[in-house]
Amino acid sequence: MSTQYFGKAHHKNGPANAFRHALWNYLIASSCSRWSTKMDRAIHWAKKITDWHEEAFVSAPLARAMDLHNNAVGRSLFIKLTSASYENLLETLIDMTKDSKLVKSENEIESSSMRLVHIIDIK
């Protein structure tokens, strides 16, 4: 889906990458929720899987912090939009991607709450 909307730009650390990480976490949580009636267990597994990925495939500290933040945004969206259609989710994520915040430090990421963040601008 990321390639469909953004081409190869989602492989860089720009807004498209933020979209990909949030969508990835939403979809993992959604899939996990099919095997458990407890939402917190689905969120736990999505976090565990994606945290492992970030540990196994090491990035620069700021890029890693960005990925972990966008992963958390995706899981939060799953909680917020559990009953939303896939199309509604995509529309929400596209809007959030347009509003993704360029950050230069981990402190800026920490203060960004439910907003997607990126570390390079891609025009």
Image (tube, grey):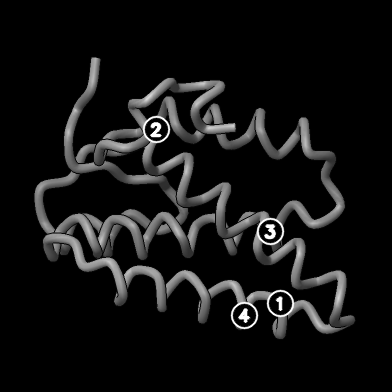
Q: Give the mark nearer the N terminus: 3 vs 1.
A: 1
Q: Amino acid at mark 1?
A: Ala
Q: Give the mark nearer the N terminus: 2 vs 3.
A: 2
Q: Which residue sits at x=28%, y=34%?
A: 14
Q: Residues within 10 Å of mark 4 (few under 14, many from 20)?
A: some
Q: CA distance from mark 3 to mark 1?
A: 10 Å
Split into 4 quadrants, where in the image is the N terminus?
A: top right
Q: Which residue is mark 4?
A: 45
Q: Are circles 4 and 1 on residues that touch, CB within 8 Å?
A: yes
Q: CA distance from mark 4 to mark 2?
A: 24 Å
Of badges 4 and 3, nearer the viewer stands 4
Q: Is residue 86 left or right of residue 47?
A: right
Q: Which residue is mark 2?
A: 16
Element assignment for label 1 = helix
Q: CA distance from mark 2 to mark 1?
A: 25 Å
Q: Are circles 3 and 1 on residues that touch, CB within 8 Å?
A: yes
Q: Give the mark nearer the N terminus: 4 vs 2.
A: 2
Of badges 2 and 3, nearer the viewer stands 2
Q: Amino acid at mark 3?
A: Phe
Q: Give the mark nearer the N terminus: 4 vs 3.
A: 4
Q: Which residue is mark 3?
A: 78
Q: Which residue sits at x=70%, y=57%?
A: 80
Q: Are circles 2 and 1 on residues that touch, CB within 8 Å?
A: no
Q: Amino acid at mark 2?
A: Ala
Numbered circles on residues, count: 4
Residue 84 placement (x, y as % from top left): 82, 45
Q: CA distance from mark 2 to mark 3?
A: 19 Å
Q: Which residue is mark 1?
A: 42
